[in-house]
Image (cartoon, grey):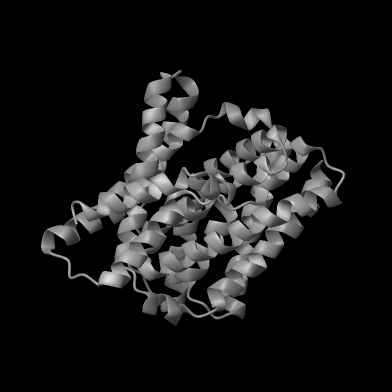
Amino acid sequence: MWILLPLIGAIAYGLAELTWAQQLGLGALPMAIVLGMVVGNLFTPTWSTSSEKLINFSKKRLLRIGIILFGSHLTLQQLVQVGWQAAVLDLVVICSVLSLGYWLGVRVLGMSREVTILTSVGSAVCGAAAILATEPVLKAKQQEVCVAVATVVVFGTLALFCYPLIYHLTDLSSASFGIYIGSTVHEVAQAVAAGQAIDADAMNSALITKLMRVMMLAPVVVVIGWLYQRAQIETDGGPSASIPWPWFVFGFIAMVTLNSLVELPAALRQGLQVSAQLALTLAMTALGLQTRFSALRQAGAKPLILSALLFVLLLGGGLLVHQLLY
């Protein structure tokens, strides 16, 4: 396992750098969980005690370290570049997708709160990274995380083929359309890929707007943890099990603040960003290795239905709000 885990992570990281993967917006995180699941299900190994410890360390400690270091991608100055309208658009998208997603998943489709929240937050904020950041406050099962990540991969990839078609049906400039892409696409890698399909201006504004959504991850995780605990108390009729306070989220905020106030050397910043990606990739690999396809089949079609509805809301509702603001 000491060789297998980093080997799978390195392969996923390398595959994500290939041209075809970048064109499809497939980053290292979804690659890692897919490869981990394939290996784990093909060989169904029995892990030794030390291997179990390594997997648990990757799923928990490395996950939190990766989220903290992920803040090195972001600066507060990026908020200014696309204007207040982009911030409002991102906020409306996040709030509407999370609230409607919860209502549809729990009330209409009868899904568990955990799968519903993970699926919704992946669509609302920043895909697999948001799902990983939310998992600790929900104490979600690994198959629930994998189901949510799978929906992000499916509909995030599908969106890449929709944006060029939508662009030709609107009279928006490429830079303005890039803001629409950044406020509605699932993953950061997908924002780059979708923007590149239009032009350089679209890619730049898409990436900045998407990173602005990523900055909102910290308050979203805190609020979700608080609301989830309240829902537990109301449902169970008494005090629920304590929800772990997401201290790593404040580390994420501190990293963003540091990156905004201090001009870090380029080599150091790049090292932090690569370290963040590697840590999250290993966390995803560990999740995949312990996830069985049978557990995913038990989830049924409901998560895909929910994600499809949120996909329509992102593309249609996001464009409508964009038109109103711009």
Can residue 211 be spotted in the picture? yes
Residue 269 drawn at (x, y percent): 41, 26
Quarter of the image for residue 274 reads top left
Quarter of the image for residue 199 reads top right
- Front residue of 197 and 299: 197
Name which residue lies at 62% across and 63% down.
99
Residue 84 drawn at (x, y percent): 71, 35
- Front residue of 200 and 77: 200
Quadrant in the picture for the C terminus: top right
Residue 182 drawn at (x, y percent): 65, 44
Name which residue lies at 68% across and 56% down.
161
Q: How many marks?
A: 0
Can residue 63 be spotted in the picture? no
Residue at the right extreme of this rendering: 171
Side of 85 relative to 171 (left or right): left
Q: From what the image shows, is residue 165 above or below residue 290?
A: above
